[in-house]
Image: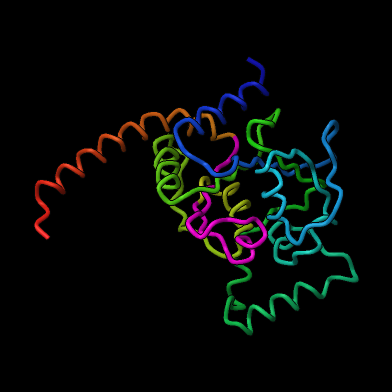
């Protein structure tokens, strides 16, 4: 089986065990512009907006200037803003500080990429032809539970706390530590259309095959435990 066909099968295998409203998104940080891939043409308000496009079925790549509209996302992706827009990071952070949304001492703790990518590719998981850096699953909490348990079963889980704002820091954090659960943030929810009842599980691309393998056992075990817990509740619950 070719590597491309393998990723198609992996997406099918995972989607057969879990229900997703949107396709898993594969993200790869590149040292050079890829060949044979569509270059993004247009504007989006944030880097995470590209997740929405890939989840909808598009495969493409961006270059650093496509990420200038979100100072926070540019920071987590280690993308320097152009000289005329360098003040936007300070302005955005000041607004967040004034709102009490972020404290100044938190900024140095935000994970970010170790170097600036020359390009970033986005695609539905089944559309990739090589191992992506990270894969994003937008899902309901029960599905996030199963994915996290599968990551633990595959020994690619992490003890890192659940992450919140900014959502985009989950990508470099995952590359550094392993699978991450992210509750998202308000900007991401607006830009991607993430539902009020959804969150993210982010895993390293190289770990996807092991997670898919562990998922079969995890879903079967949870189905059995569901039946057991329902029976015990019916038998013993008195209120």
Residue 208 is drawn in which quadrant? Answer: top right
Judged from this view, the residue extending furthest toward the bottom is 98
Q: Residue 179's x, y, as percent? A: 51, 46
The quadrant the N terminus occupies is top right
Tell me where residue 155 appears, x and y as whole percent. Answer: 43, 37
Q: Residue at x 47, y 57 (%)?
A: 197
Q: Position of residue 122 (x, y in %)?
A: 72, 42
Here the colouring is rainbow
Looking at the rendering, which quadrant does residue 237 occupy?
Answer: bottom left
Magenta stretch, residue numbers: 181-205
Q: Quadrant of residue 132?
A: top right
- Residue 188 among magenta residues: yes
Q: Residue shown at 78%/53% (left/top)? A: 116
Front residue of this view, candidates 18 and 39: 18
Frontmost residue, 231 versus 168: 231
Q: Residue at x 44, y 32 (%)?
A: 17
Across and down, in percent, residue 20 comes to 52, 42
- Whether the magenta-drawn stretch holds residue 158 is answered as no
Residue 8, compared with residue 138, is above or below; it is above
Looking at the picture, does residue 38 appear above or below residue 165?
A: above
- Closer to the camera, 235 or 2? 235
- Image quadrant holding the C terminus, namely bottom left
* Lateral position of residue 211 relative to residue 217, left or right: right
Q: In the image, is 173 to the left or to the right of 145? A: right
Q: In the orientation shown, which residue stands out farthest toward the right?
A: 84
Q: Residue furthest top?
A: 1
Asked if residue 223 is positioned above or below residue 86 in the image, the reply reads above
Q: How many labels, in total?
A: 0
């Amino acid at each position: 089986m070719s590597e491309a066909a393998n990723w198609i099968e992996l997406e099918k295998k995972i989607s057969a065990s879990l229900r997703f409203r949107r396709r898993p998104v594969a993200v790869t940080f590149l040292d050079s512009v890829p060949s044979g891939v569509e270059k993004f043409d247009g504007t989006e308000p944030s880097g995470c907006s590209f997740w929405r496009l890939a989840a909808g079925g598009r495969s493409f790549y961006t270059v650093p200037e496509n990420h200038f509209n979100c100072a926070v996302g540019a920071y987590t992706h280690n993308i320097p803003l152009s000289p005329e827009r360098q003040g936007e990071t300070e302005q955005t952070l000041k607004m967040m500080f004034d709102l009490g949304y972020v404290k100044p001492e938190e900024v140095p703790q935000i994970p970010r990429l170790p170097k600036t990518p020359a390009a970033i590719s986005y695609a539905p998981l089944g559309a990739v032809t090589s191992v992506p850096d990270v894969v994003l699953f937008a899902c309901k909490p029960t599905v996030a539970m199963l994915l996290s348990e599968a990551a633990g079963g595959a020994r690619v889980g992490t003890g890192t706390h659940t992450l919140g704002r900014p959502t985009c820091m989950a990508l470099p954090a995952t590359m550094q530590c392993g699978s991450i659960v992210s509750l998202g943030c308000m900007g991401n929810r607006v830009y991607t259309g993430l539902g009020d009842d959804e969150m993210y599980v982010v895993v390293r691309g190289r770990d996807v095959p092991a997670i898919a393998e562990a998922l079969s056992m995890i879903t079967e075990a949870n189905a059995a435990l569901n039946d057991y817990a329902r029976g015990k509740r019916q038998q013993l619950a008195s209120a």
